[in-house]
Amino acid sequence: MLSYQHHYHAGNPADVHKHALLAWMLDYLVQKDKPLTYIETHSGRGLYDLGDEAALKTGEAARGVSLLEAGLAEAHPYRQRLNEVRFKYGPMAYPGSPLIAAMTLREEDTLHLAELHPGEHAILTEHLTQWDAHIHRQDGFKLAQAICPPTPRRGLLLVDPSYEVKAEYDSIPGDFAKIARKWNVGVLVLWYPLLTSGSHGGMLSQLSAHFPDALRHEVRFPPVRDGHRMIGSGMFIVNPPYGIAEECARLTALFNAKG
């Protein structure tokens, strides 16, 4: 369960989908003059170098951010975070979701990041030193269970597992439902891959039964390399923010145009 290393996949099409929606949601939430809490259960290292050997080996960013970024408006919150990160860390830097959140939130907001992998946790801690983030080397679902409902109660949870253990597809709906019972006002977001095997289907059926009013947005794209089983990206959102349907439509159009 600790073998997954996202730096091989940073900036891929699924990252663009996930991070563009996340940046939009966080930007929407901070417009209101009330503090919020951001919780992430599978944080990774927060910052990636698309020029390092691992990223170049897979070449996934070339089919993701390098191809899709220009299709978004310059004022889009995702593009703003990309520009800020490149200015600060160099032209090949790419922000993970913890850094997107840290750069969007305000001083009055609270940031909780969980990462179980010891190496990734150490790098995450180093990358987030200048922000007042609570960084936990802990199972993310256990962390969310422990701190929900958080203070402030307003906010967003991102669940972004690697799905390298097939049992996650069975356990996630129950874990997600437990968190929702404790934090019924939170924007609860789950990312999932669309796979040629259809492994995600049963999980989504269970989630839809638990949350019939949730928003589900999916984009599809060609495999990033021969033999790759991921053919799309999905976001399951409980308590979706106002206006997100229009943002989803824009992203659908973007991916369809580049597909």
Image (cartoon, rainbow, N blue to C red):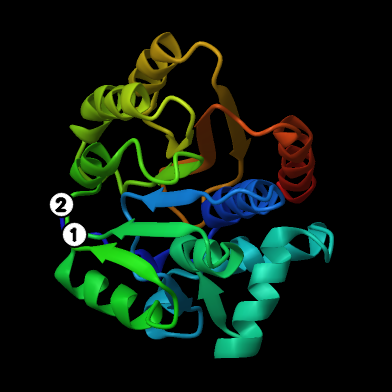
The reply to whether the C-beta atoms of the residues labelled 1 and 2 are less than 8 Å apart is yes
Front residue of 172 and 10: 172
Left-right relation of 147 to 21: left
Q: Residue at the location (18% across, 62% down)? A: 137
Q: Which image quadrant for residue 85?
A: bottom right
Front residue of 161 and 222: 161
Left-right relation of 97 to 215: left
| Residue 5 shows in the view | no
Q: Which image quadrant for residue 190?
A: top left
Q: Residue at the location (50% across, 67% down)? A: 102
Instruction: Please name the amino acid that badge 1 sits on.
Output: Leu
Counting other residues with Cα less than 10 Å from the Cα at mark 1, is it few (<14), some (14-19), or many (20 or more)? some
On the image, numbered disc 2 is attached to which residue? 1
Left-right relation of 61 to 96: right
Alpha carbons under labels 1 and 2: distance apart? 9 Å
Percent coordinates x, y for residue 244 in the rendering:
71, 35
Percent coordinates x, y for residue 107 in the rendering:
53, 67
Q: Is residue 13 above or below residue 257?
A: below
- Secondary structure under the numbered disc 1 in the rendered image: loop
Left-right relation of 105 to 58: right
Eye-nearest disc, 1 or 2: 1
Q: Is residue 154 above or below residue 71?
A: above
Counting other residues with Cα less than 10 Å from the Cα at mark 2, is it few (<14), some (14-19), or many (20 or more)? few
Residue 116 badge:
1
